[in-house]
């Protein structure tokens, strides 16, 4: 089934459609983890898909733990807010108040700059390329948090503090160091006793030095030697092209990504953010500076304000999205590195809100016929006048909308093509002379028809 009609339906019907969609993703190897969707505080989906351990065929379930990666940042920012409210620090304090051997360039960097990624301190991950051999070797060593701070000190700032947004994982490692200095506790102890404990997040913690977390799913990476034919057909989890991902050192003061947790604990966090007890902090948590709050990306979708964050370390991806106007929450944690969580989140939101969406399916590539494709090349106009240009690319027929995208089209048979870029299909119709007459782009549950411009 490709197109699912938009309808709101009962909670039971919505839950069934959410599960059907996620099961389709899992069967294709496009999601392996746990998903939770809730509205008005009521859970519509809370289910594991695939395996926490492929070798032992241990299934994922609601109690499975994952590395949260950058979702850690919102808890670090919340802890800083706690310490500020307790009179332990000010957001306008220079970080040199809390950092030994602080370089002169950091005197102008404030706690607030670190929270909102406007410090100018270079991001250590930018030079390593997440998941690369260089990254894996660097992150396999112990005490990487200390090494990252030491290597950051002699580097010049990328820009004057407070003048730009530039995402910096290094900044959140420094915030974890601030927490340790101010509280007199280790980062892990403070987060356990002052953040996770009071929130009832009993399954959450900071990865310990020995990197052993009971109940933690094993992280996997997909092979880089796959053909497009294999990828679009689907990569089932068992007996598929997956191997254990390199284990990164996220122990110690890794405020950028060292948290392990469950979707259930993240849901407790989400619900706490509606609590009157935190009402005095909520506005500040979600007030954007250059689009970023206290560990939250502030955006919108379907005309609704969206508060979200993603996380990525080798073998683990995570995503949390909140739509406070309709009290809708989506939380995803996966131990495969190839899940398209942004697309999945968009589609599950569509299901809950009764909007169009597509159920994912396997796609079978046929042989390319570049001569036949050449007769489809041309300019096509959408109903709003937007021009879609079809051209014969080096490897595939391509369609492009200027300043928006160029998408390669994989032949599925006849004049039907699959477009991995937007996970949709493009179907051409021909005029009597055999050339392209119309093209129909189908994605996100809707058709967009363009007519050739002569």
Image (cartoon, helix red, strand yellow):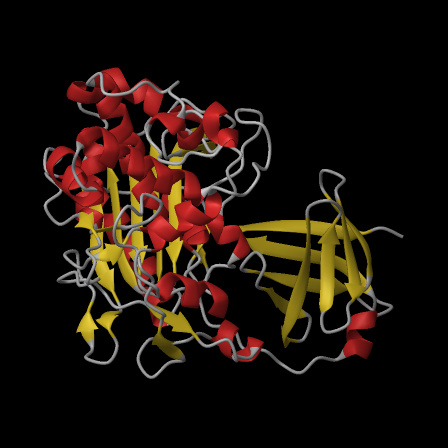
Quarter residue 113 falls in: top left
Quarter residue 73 falls in: top left
Using residue 397 as the reference point, say whether residue 39 is left or right of it. left
The residue positioned 40% from the left and 65% from the top of the image is: 30
- Percent x, y of residue 445: 50, 51
Residue in front for this viewpoint, 104 or 313: 104
Q: Quadrant of the N terminus?
A: bottom left
Count of marks, rendered view? 0
Residue in front for this viewpoint, 218 or 15: 218
Using residue 334 as the reference point, say whether residue 192 is left or right of it. left
Residue 142 seen = yes
Query: In the displayed image of the protein, which residue is found farthest to the right?
Result: 454
The residue positioned 54% from the left and 43% from the top of the image is: 155
Residue 444 seen = no
| Above/below status of 20 relative to 161 | below
Quarter residue 419 falls in: bottom right
Residue in front for this viewpoint, 269 or 103: 103
- Percent x, y of residue 157: 56, 36
- Percent x, y of residue 268: 17, 38
| Above/below status of 205 relative to 214 | above
Query: In the displayed image of the protein, which residue is found farthest to the front?
Result: 101
| Above/below status of 302 relative to 337 | above
The residue positioned 36% from the left and 35% from the top of the image is: 295
Residue in front for this viewpoint, 350 or 308: 308
- Percent x, y of residue 138: 42, 63
């Amino acid at each position: 089934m490709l197109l699912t009609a938009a309808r709101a339906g009962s909670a039971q019907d919505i839950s069934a459609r959410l599960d059907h969609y996620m099961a389709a993703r899992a069967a294709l190897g496009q999601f392996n983890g746990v998903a939770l969707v809730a509205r008005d505080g009521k859970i519509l989906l809370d289910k594991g898909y695939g395996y926490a351990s492929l070798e032992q065929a241990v299934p994922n379930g609601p109690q499975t733990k994952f590395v949260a990666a950058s979702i850690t940042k919102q808890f670090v920012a919340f802890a800083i807010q706690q310490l500020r409210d307790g009179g332990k620090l000010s957001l306008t304090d220079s970080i040199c108040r809390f950092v030994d051997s602080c370089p002169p360039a950091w005197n102008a960097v404030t706690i607030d700059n670190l929270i909102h990624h406007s410090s100018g301190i270079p991001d250590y991950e930018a030079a390593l390329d997440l998941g690369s051999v260089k990254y894996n070797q660097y992150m396999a060593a112990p005490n990487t948090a200390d090494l990252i701070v030491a290597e950051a000190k002699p580097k010049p700032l990328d820009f004057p503090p407070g003048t730009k947004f530039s995402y910096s994982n290094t900044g959140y490692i420094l915030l974890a160091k601030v927490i340790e200095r101010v509280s007199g506790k280790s980062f892990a102890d403070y987060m356990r006793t002052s953040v996770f404990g009071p929130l009832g997040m009993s399954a959450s913690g900071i990865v310990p030095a020995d990197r052993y977390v009971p109940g933690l799913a094993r992280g996997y990476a997909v092979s880089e030697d796959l053909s497009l034919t294999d990828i679009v057909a689907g990569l089932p989890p068992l007996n598929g092209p997956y191997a254990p991902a390199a284990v990164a050192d996220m122990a110690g003061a890794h405020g950028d990504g060292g948290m392990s947790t469950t979707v259930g604990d993240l849901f407790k966090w989400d619900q706490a953010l509606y609590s009157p007890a935190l009402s005095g902090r909520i506005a500040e948590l979600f007030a954007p500076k250059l689009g970023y709050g206290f560990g939250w990306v502030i955006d919108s979708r379907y005309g609704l304000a969206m508060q979200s964050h993603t996380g990525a370390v080798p073998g683990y991806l995570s995503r949390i999205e909140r739509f406070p106007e309709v009290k809708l929450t989506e939380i995803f944690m996966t131990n495969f590195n190839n899940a398209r969580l942004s697309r999945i989140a968009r589609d599950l939101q569509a299901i809950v809100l009764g909007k169009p969406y597509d159920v994912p399916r396997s796609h079978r590539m046929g042989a390319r016929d570049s001569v036949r494709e050449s007769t489809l090349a041309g300019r096509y106009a959408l109903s709003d006048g937007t021009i879609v240009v079809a051209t014969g690319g080096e490897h595939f027929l391509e369609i492009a909308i200027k300043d928006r995208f160029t998408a390669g089209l994989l032949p599925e048979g006849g004049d039907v093509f699959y477009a991995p870029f937007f996970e949709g299909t493009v179907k051409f119709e021909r005029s009597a002379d055999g050339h392209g007459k119309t093209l129909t782009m189908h994605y996100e549950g809707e058709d967009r028809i363009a007519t050739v411009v002569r």
